Amino acid sequence: MLPSPSISTRTRAPCARRPFAAAGREPRIDASHPGTTLTMALVVFRSKAAGEIFMFAESARRIFEIIGRQDSPRGVITAEQVPDALRRLVDAVEEEKAQLKVAREDAELQDKQGDGTVQPRPITLGQRAFPLVEMLREAQKKKVDVTWGI
């Protein structure tokens, strides 16, 4: 049985979810012009000490800020820099835990007073950073670099 000509000759309409497809081009990351902000969707951390870690760019930017690294499409934390990066990240996680504990106690106090609004528990830095903290610990033990890229 031969396929229907209407099916085989029909052209595909541009997909609304792919705005670049309608223009006949693919999206690309371009930071070659001064003042251009690089937009990353995912950042991949790699090390010989552990498996790859995929992280959303928003979370990675926060971690880069904490460990004192520039938000760039590629980078490396050398074996000599790993202990400092690990210390900074663990300190930030511990500081956030202390802040959340105080906020939770305040929320419980307000709840006991009858405010009645229940706040959802946010996803914490500790939860987002945990895989990277583990990678940095292993990299420190094995004295290897940690790299990232998009």
Image (cartoon, helix red, strand yellow):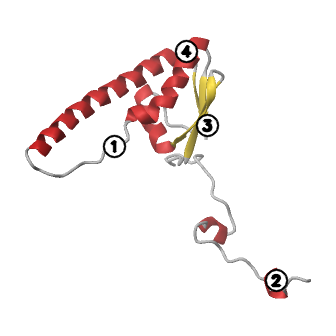
Give SS at disc 1.
loop
Give the mark nearest the N terminus, 1 or 4: 1
Do tag 1 and tag 4 residues touch (Cβ < 8 Å)? no
Q: Quadrant of residue 104?
A: top left
The residue tagged 3 is 149
Q: Quadrant of residue 94?
A: top left
Q: CA distance from mark 1 to mark 4?
A: 30 Å
Q: CA distance from mark 2 to mark 4?
A: 60 Å
Mark seen at residue 37? none
Q: Quadrant of residue 89?
A: top left
The residue tagged 4 is 140
* Label 3 Cα neighbours within 10 Å, binned few <14 / some 14-19 / many ≥20: some
Q: Given the image, on which type of amino acid does mark 1 rest?
A: Pro
Q: Given the image, on which type of amino acid does mark 3 rest?
A: Gly
Give the mark nearest the N terminus, 1 or 2: 2
Give SS at disc 4.
helix
Q: Is residue 149 visible?
A: yes
Relative to 70, residue 19 above or below:
below
Q: CA distance from mark 1 to mark 3?
A: 27 Å
Give the mark nearest the N terminus, 4 or 3: 4
Give the mark nearest the N terminus, 2 or 4: 2
The residue tagged 1 is 122
Pick the front one: 30 or 63: 63
Give the mark nearest the N terminus, 1 or 3: 1
Q: Given the image, on which type of amino acid does mark 2 rest?
A: Thr
Give the mark nearest the N terminus, 3 or 2: 2
Give SS at disc 2.
loop
Q: Position of residue 1 (x, y in %)?
A: 92, 83
Q: Is residue 64 visible?
A: no
Q: Position of residue 136 (x, y in %)?
A: 53, 22
